[in-house]
Image (cartoon, grey):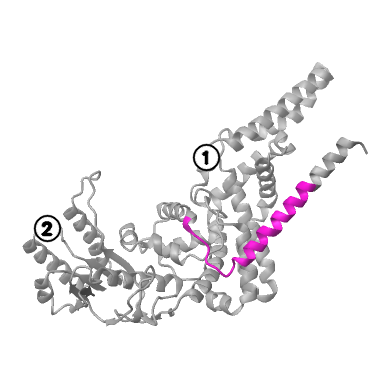
Amino acid sequence: MNQPLLLLVAALAVLLVYAVQRTVRRRAKLRRSLDTAPSSEPELAAARRFWESFQKHRPQPHAVDNLTWDDLDMDSVFTSVNCCRSGAGSLWLYTRLRLQRPADALPSGEDPVEFFTREDALCRKMKYRLALLGPHGGTGAEALLFDASSLQLPYARFAWLAAVLPFASFALWPLIGVGEGLTVTVLLLLANFMACIWLRSRPGSGFPVLCGFSSLLGCAQELEKLFSRESPDNAAELRSACRAFRPLRFPLSVLKWNDAAFQAGLFDPSCFFLLPVLSYVYVVRRFETHADDGLRLLRALGGLDVAAGTALLRGTLPCWCRPEYTQDAEVSFTDLCHPLLDDPVPNSASFVRGALFTGSNASGKSTFLKAVAVNCILARTLDTCFARSFRLRRGAVFTSIAVRDSILAGTSYFMAELLSLRRILRYAETGEFCYVFIDEILRGTNTVERVAAAQAALEYLAGKNCLVLAATHDLELAQLLTGHYDNYHFREEVRGGEVQF
């Protein structure tokens, strides 16, 4: 064997050893991180985009609206409770928080979080596979699931013709000669190759989205095998979710190989025959009519990730409980805390009708309202509350707390307050039960008009199917509404020259 060949073999061996060592180190690092909550900051923007597409194409009337979400700083809450290992889990956690949708029970009826808490070894195997999927697994799926036609390639109708032309050119060889015919065939193959590279590389290409979904499908199929013995119910659910995509196995594998070759800068001969393009066109057309199946797969895989993440979250909390549900319009709790506070002051209370809160500035009224509202959402979605006990009725959550004016929209602060209240009043008119949290109602106008308008609005809500908790500095309002609302006061004490609330 000559010296250049030996050097090439040695270089390839070094690269192979380096790649194997890198893979081993990466997987060992993933295993060590399974018991710690991962950072979810990068997933927030992707999760928000997914929800916006979800709400645009499948409006949900009982979802947490944008004003309530921003009032409660739910982006930060999402980040703090997100212990998911994959992008699919993060997408579904964010969506579930917005939908106020409870977790799906296992086919056996068991709570999935309790199942993964008990089956720790199985949970670790699942989390490891989800960690291999990565934080971006599933991100970008909103276009595929809700608007697949927007991903279709330009000139897709001519793809089959272009793929057939190199084979059809063989018929020219006897007519124009072998040399000239071969030249035509080679030129057609090169044209197909360049067209494939251009379509793959153009801005906004949907190839990474389809490859990401292929990874999701592969992960679901592996988890189905993992659960087949230890959890047949979970295996059956995953198998059912994957069934609709059996016809897509080959085109998705073609796309995945093409993506790997493209990322590594390797040569992919299938591009000569537009096989990646044809596979892409076929998969997108399939999703145009089978988007529900894709959403079901994401929900099944993401739901398992959320359940395992919630089990991990509970283990990190000094105090938590599962909520207790009632048919009465009430909310009661013991040692309730806000999830974003490092050193919170726990509160215990019980409300069977509306309540007004008065007290000094910075005494904790707003934080208290937000803590109750956030825990109402977490109770419904994660079956987990930051309290020793929490009792509530199932219902939507609405807030009017951090109202802002808008110069661009031409909306004054007072008008923004009125619009915020109007959406609450309209929902109350539907008769559906809801929780309403209001801070400093109508502060954007003078005292006389504020008290009169606030009294009318709160009296109206008191007669509807809702429970209202509101903070105010207007003591007159507390007196006027005594027959409809209970009054509570946050007070302060001066100790050692400092004010303590």
Which residue has dot 2 on it? 445
Question: Relative to residue 278, is residue 315 drawn left or right?
Answer: left
Q: Nearer the viewer, residue 175 or 113?
A: 113
In this view of the protein, can residue 463 be seen by the observer?
no
Identify the residue shown where x is 56% and y is 74%: 106
**Three-letter amino acid code of the residue under disc 2:** Thr
Is 380 magenta? The answer is: no
Q: Quadrant of residue 430?
A: bottom left
How packed mark 1 is, by other alpha carbons closer than 10 Å (few <14, some 14-19, many 20 or more), is few
**Residue type at the position of mark 1:** Gly
Segment tinted magenta in the rendering: 14-41
Q: Which residue is mark 1?
A: 204
Residue farthest along the left direction in this orientation? 448
The quadrant in which the C terminus is found is bottom left
Tag 2, which secondary structure?
loop
Residue 202 lies in quadrant: top right
Q: Earlier in the sequence, mark 1 or mark 2?
A: 1
Q: Is residue 164 above or below residue 327?
A: above
Q: Is residue 32 magenta?
A: yes
